Amino acid sequence: MIPRNSHSNIPRHIAVIMDGNGRWAKKQGAARIFGHQNAITAVRETTEYCAENGVDFLTLYAFSTENWGRPKYEVDGLMALLVKTLDKELPTLQKNHVKLRTIGDTRKLPGETQRKLASVKEATSGNTGLNLVLALNYSGRSEIVDTVKAITEKVKNGELNPEEVDDYLISESLSTAGIPDPELLIRTSGEMRISNFLLWQLAYTELYFTEVLWPDFRKKNMIEAVEAFQLRERRFGKTSEQVATR
């Protein structure tokens, strides 16, 4: 058995659904935005853990297309917080050689948010360490629909034969093209669903659910999640005997 938390069995790509900010704030008798503000430490520690332990990609579900339905003050507060956090955390990203990337339709974000994202992505574009991927205005279903439309258009224009459409082509047509599928998905706050997140990419991902609310999530919780991952047998449809003889 591979030792737990061994660097030889660290997931290459970890995805996180950061849930529980509102409930955390409610416990403090405060507005929901207070929970988002106090979740920055969890983001920082999770990113640092991944950067320090050889994880290549960390994808954080930061804002879904459904989140536009939340109260306007909360959405506005989230966008302002994102800009402020990117400003404050840029030196740390540079220090840890972290490269910022995004998935989702960021064109619909406020102008100031778009400009700050573009600025930090450009500033970190040469970094060769962890790829920090923020899913912003992201929807797994919309991503698949857009991909089907793009492939259909190519078939219609004679650029592609239907027989050429396969798993690889679809994967390379998604917004995550060039990014390996997550090996581990972590969801905090005790909820047990994937909420329209990376629907295609999570086909064989190990799922880990914890009762810890996101603002309370720390490096020790990351270690627990990775250790749980390392104890699992990933068979990809094969038998245990087949996996053992690979």
Image: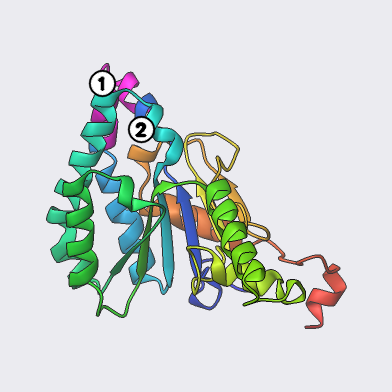
Does the rendering let one see residue 201?
no
Q: Image point 27% across, 28% down: which residue?
A: 74
Instruction: Indicate the position of residue 31 as horizontal and vertical percent values.
Output: 26, 21
56 above or below 62? below
Q: Is residue 129 visible?
A: yes
- Which of the pair 79/6 is nearer the observer? 79
Residue at the spot of label 2: 21
**Real-space Cα separation, disc 1 to disc 2, in angstroms:** 10 Å
Q: Looking at the image, what colour scheme do you see? A: rainbow
Is 33 left, or right, of 193 in this rendering?
left
Q: Nearer the viewer, residue 47 or 221?
A: 47
> SS class of the residue under badge 2?
helix
Instruction: Indicate whether 71 appears above or below 190.
Output: above
Residue 124 sits inside the magenta stretch: no
SS assignment at label 1: loop
- Report the residue at 40% width, 71% height from top: 53
Residue occupying image coordinates x 78% and y 83% = 246
- Residue span colored magenta: 24-36
Vertical side of 245 occupied by 239: above or below: above
Task: Name the residue tied to disc 1.
Answer: 31
The amino acid marked with disc number 2 is Asn
Tell me which label, 1 or 2, sits earlier in the chain: 2
The part of the image, by quadrant, that contains residue 96 is bottom left
